[in-house]
């Protein structure tokens, strides 16, 4: 499928290195890459970019982000990207800068876009604690059994905070059954991989 | 004193002093039936006529027997405690034998309900899983991302003899109260995390069998 960008995005790309100075354009491309890869809040602002002509700079910023995201989405090759930009008369130095940026960060861009979209909660971490009851409101003595509290969670990609997805309790036998079940899944996965 | 029966409950059990061991067995059976299916007024009426007494006496005796069962389990009563009860209440030896058997045989049944189940955390009951490959998304048209999707079945009901009964009942229909105590959850993970999870949980299991933990548990038990 060939790459297709809207007129406003093309305009934003074409004004880089022409209507916007070369120096600012390069800064803008670097900054736009950061915006594409990380959440908005973690990118420090660069006021220089918007000093001369804020409206044009914002349009170009939007254009660079769109170019990187759409090219990644369609798994576009760098050479095809180059041909497309040449055809649309993007300033040659800027063209080179855009293609190199895309080529050098393709892996990161792909990983970033793998994380987008709807999914079931994705577990990436497990925490556990072992508890034994001593006395309770309903019983004067310990049941002598251990309980395993298992907490499955994930780390928030934008702020790194841990979030609990599910927490449950297992007895020793139940924990053993859970481990066996997980190992069974692992075995099946290995079988498929081979 | 381990057995902490109320005066009123002791009074309700007086019926046992006047009856034979066979009658005591019958009353104990009714008490157990109460635990499984709730009160059975028809049966109490029948027993009341048989013992030439009234319905309330039988009902109170059955409830007092359940109180005795719970109390004995709660306090982990031993033979000595039961003997003390016999001395205080004057049951004959045959009736006492029936009571001891009743308490001992049903202790395990009660234990699950009162010991570990007072605070109702979710328990993992079952896992269903599926190995999947995500092939495309709106933001990335070409990909092959392997993941394991799991459905976790969680219950808050205690796992013990009582639960087994609930499982049988489930075949017919799930009571709305029981449904409220259950939830299932869809989650997913990747293969690296799966391996990590197995390792972590095995560490937990290994740790639980350590001398230190065994010593602590036997000291508080």
Image (tube, coloured by chain):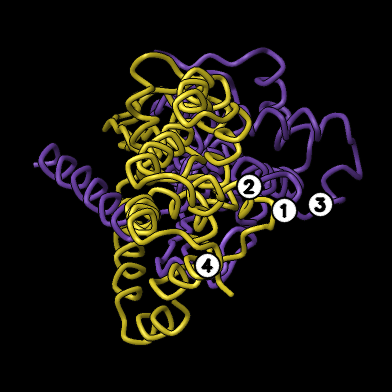
Chain colours: A purple, B yellow
Q: Is residue A5 left or right of residue B82?
A: right
Given contact means CB atoms under 8 Å apart, are the residues at marks 3 and 1 in contact? no
Residue at the disc numbered 1: A42
x and y, in percent, of residue A188 in the image: 15, 40
Given contact means CB atoms under 8 Å apart, are the residues at marks 2 and 1 in contact? yes
**Chain of the residue where label 2 is placed in the rendered structure:** A
Residue at the disc numbered 2: A38
Q: Are marks 4 and 2 on the same chain?
A: no
Within 10 angstroms of label 1, few (less than 14), some, or many (20 or more) residues? few
Q: Are marks 3 and 1 on the same chain?
A: yes
- How far apart are the two marked residues, 4 and 2, measured between alpha carbons? 60 Å
- Which tag is nearer the camera, tag 4 or tag 1? 4
The secondary structure type at the circle numbered 1 is: helix
**Chain of the residue where label 1 is placed in the rendered structure:** A
- Which tag is nearer the camera, tag 4 or tag 2? 4
- Which tag is nearer the camera, tag 2 or tag 3? 2
**Chain of the residue where label 3 is placed in the rendered structure:** A
Residue at the disc numbered 3: A45
- Compare marks 2 and 3 and give the one earlier in the sequence: 2
Q: Is residue A105 left or right of residue B109?
A: right
Which disc is residue A88 wearing?
none
Q: Are marks 4 and 3 on the same chain?
A: no
Residue at the disc numbered 4: B75
- Residue located 54% across and 58% down the image: B71
- How far apart are the two marked residues, 4 and 1, measured between alpha carbons? 59 Å
Q: Is residue A85 visible?
A: no
């Amino acid at each position: 499928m060939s790459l297709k960008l809207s007129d406003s995005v093309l305009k934003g790309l074409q004004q880089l290195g022409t209507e916007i100075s070369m120096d600012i354009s390069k800064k803008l491309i670097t900054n736009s890459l950061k915006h594409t890869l990380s959440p908005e809040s973690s990118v420090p602002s660069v006021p220089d970019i918007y000093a001369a002509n804020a409206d044009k700079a914002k349009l170009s910023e939007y254009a660079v982000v769109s170019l990187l995201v759409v090219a990644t989405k369609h798994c576009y090759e760098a050479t095809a990207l180059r041909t497309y930009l040449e055809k649309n008369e993007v300033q040659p130095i800027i063209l080179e800068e855009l293609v190199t940026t895309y080529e050098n960060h393709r892996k990161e861009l792909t990983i970033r876009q793998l994380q987008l979209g709807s999914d079931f909660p994705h577990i990436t971490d497990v925490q556990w604690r072992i508890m034994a009851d001593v006395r309770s409101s309903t019983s004067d003595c310990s049941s002598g059994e251990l309980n395993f509290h298992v907490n499955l969670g994930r780390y928030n990609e934008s702020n790194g905070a841990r979030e609990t997805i599910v927490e449950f309790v297992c007895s020793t036998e139940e924990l053993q059954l859970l481990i066996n079940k997980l190992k069974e899944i692992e075995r099946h996965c290995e079988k498929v991989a081979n | 004193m381990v057995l902490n029966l109320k005066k009123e409950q002791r009074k309700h059990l007086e019926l046992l002093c006047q009856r034979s061991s066979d009658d005591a067995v019958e009353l104990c059976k009714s008490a157990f039936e109460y635990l499984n299916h709730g009160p059975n007024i028809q049966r109490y009426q029948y027993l009341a006529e048989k013992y030439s007494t009234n319905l309330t006496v039988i009902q109170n005796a059955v409830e007092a027997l359940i109180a005795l069962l719970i109390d004995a389990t709660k306090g982990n009563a031993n033979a000595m405690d039961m003997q003390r009860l016999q001395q205080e209440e004057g049951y004959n030896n045959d009736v006492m034998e029936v009571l001891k058997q009743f308490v001992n045989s049903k202790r395990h049944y009660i234990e699950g309900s009162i010991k570990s189940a007072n605070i109702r955390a979710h328990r993992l009951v079952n896992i269903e899983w599926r190995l999947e490959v995500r092939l495309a998304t709106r933001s990335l048209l070409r990909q092959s991302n392997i993941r394991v999707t799991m459905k976790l079945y969680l219950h808050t009901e205690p796992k013990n003899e009582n639960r087994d009964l609930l499982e049988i009942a489930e075949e017919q229909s799930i009571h709305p109260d029981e449904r409220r105590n259950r939830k299932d959850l869809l989650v997913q993970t990747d293969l690296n995390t799966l391996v990590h999870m197995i390792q972590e949980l095995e560490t937990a299991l290994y740790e639980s069998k350590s001398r230190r933990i065994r010593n602590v548990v036997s000291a508080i038990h």
